[in-house]
Amino acid sequence: MNKILNFIEGIGSTFRKKMARLGAGTRLFFLVLIYSGDSFKRIHLTIREIYFTGVLSLIIIVVSAFFVGMVLGLQGYYTLEKYGSSEAIGVLVALALVRELGPVVTALLFAGRAGTAITAEIGLMKATEQLSAMEVMAVSPVARIIAPRFWAGMISMPILATIFSMVGILGGYFIAVLVIGVDEGSFWSQMQANVDFSNDIVDGAIKSIVFGFACTIIALFEGFDAPPTAEGVSRATTRTVVISSLAVLGLDFILTSFMFV
Amino acid sequence: MDELITIDDLSFGYGSSSLHKNINMKFSRGKVSAIMGGSGCGKTTILKLIAGQLIPKSGKVIVDGQIVHEQDRDGIYNVRRKMGMLFQHGALFTDLSVYENVAFPMREHTNLPENIIKDLVLLKLNAVGLRGAQKKMPSELSGGMARRVALARAIALDPDIIMYDEPFAGLDPISMAVICDLIRSLNDALGATSIIVTHDVAETFSFADYIYFLADGKIAAEGTPKQLLASRLPFVRQFIHSEKDGPVPFHVEAPSYKVDLQL
């Protein structure tokens, strides 16, 4: 009987802790909104963070996108060829990238590269008392550290997803047209005819904004909430990747079911 | 005597535990006071309570006539603008140079033009002897130098109160002597009130005006260094003469050997 009670108590306490963390994360988001005015006044802080989270993520985004595009070109070509419609490869590559792979893969890479860096940096700032020092100097760490990073993530992520889709399409073009020899005219014209701006491109952009929000706020909260020890920071960094990835995939399903079904 | 900070009947603890029980302290204007005691006795917590980072369970912390924990966020920030704090390991911002670290409070709280900020930063860095290190990054500094830069940053806005959290921890004897000298000379030059949290007996007794000893959540003893050196209280004697056994036992409370070895 005691074991059953302990089990139920365990579920309850875990659920309560998770809810408390969700509440704390939401509170942090509202604090970011309140202090955003300060970070816009000192725009150089946000620009600096855009460089760290966005510009420095470019290489991994561009290289991955090119490979993803090439794989799509190869797989797509061999499948479409069976049905004699290999010239539709341009549409397949573009739709797959713009609707799904662009935002999703970019968000996963963003969580792995920029998200972990944000969590580790803020966690270590906490562990080395830099955030406390700011508080004692009457400077809000949310205004000075969190808000600029939040807006940098929100601005960088959609741009990175767009670049991902563009480079991916070039990767598909490279394989399908230049290597396999699909007609270049059909590749581009079919793409132009079948990719819709408001349905496909705008929906893809909305996805990337939502994923950017999720990845950035999770990374910031995990760093801000990390216990100030080596173990605490390492666990927080791991959690950032795990929770961000799951959030991106879950949100992708929800958004897709609203947008494209 | 004119007190700048008064701690009145303060009790504090994390969760249900109790760290401080009905503590009373007074820190006089213009004096260097020290809070001493063993590791984990809640010395640093007192600084955090004064800075309004923690809220007491009962009692009051009054800084310059204002009850700190009854202030709203802006009120607490206004109180903190009168304070400078030196953290145990400096807590320098690792992404900013030495110059920018010292300029940080000035940029955040004033609209001074760049040339005035430059003059002030160099003045503060000169006071701690590190004008020559202005372009260095915190990772390029030794522990003692980092502590001195943090001190320059703490006094950037000429605070009324300077708080030091373990300023001597992990320093070589030369750096230690430099920091001792700086604490006293900066306090007197700025007309500030300094509070030092430490367990280094020799250094503290050499320059502090008044000392509080904390043990078991209470003030075990207080007085001038002279009075404490003459004290016959067992705890004070054990602490000052570094005796390994006494009122603070060598062994942590444990069950008997028989129980532990299951004999």
Image (cartoon, rainbow, N blue to C red):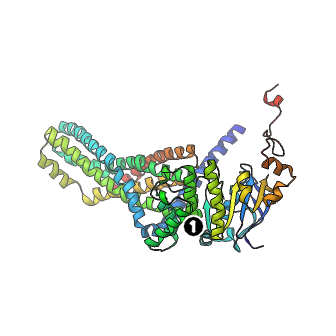
Using a 10 Å C-alpha cutoff, classify the residue at mark 1 as few (fewer than 14 neighbours), some (14 to 19) or many (20 or more): many
Residue B101 coordinates in the image, percent (x, y): 50, 61
- Looking at the picture, which amino acid does disc 1 mark? Ala
- Residues B119 and A233: in front is B119
**Left or right of A93 in this view: A182:** left
Name the residue carrying label 1.
A138
Q: Quadrant of the rendered structure where residue A23 is? A: bottom right
The quarter of the image holding the N terminus of chain A is top right
Residue A224 coordinates in the image, percent (x, y): 54, 54
The answer to whether residue A34 shows anywhere in this view is no
Element assignment for label 1? loop
Q: Residue at x 47, y 72 (%)?
A: B116
Q: Residue at x 62, y 70 (%)?
A: B82
Q: Is residue A56 above or below residue B79?
A: above
The answer to whether residue B135 shows anywhere in this view is yes
Residue B3 coordinates in the image, percent (x, y): 74, 71
Residue B254 coordinates in the image, percent (x, y): 80, 37
Q: Residue at x 68, y 60 (%)?
A: B47
Q: Quadrant of the rendered structure where residue A40 is? A: bottom left
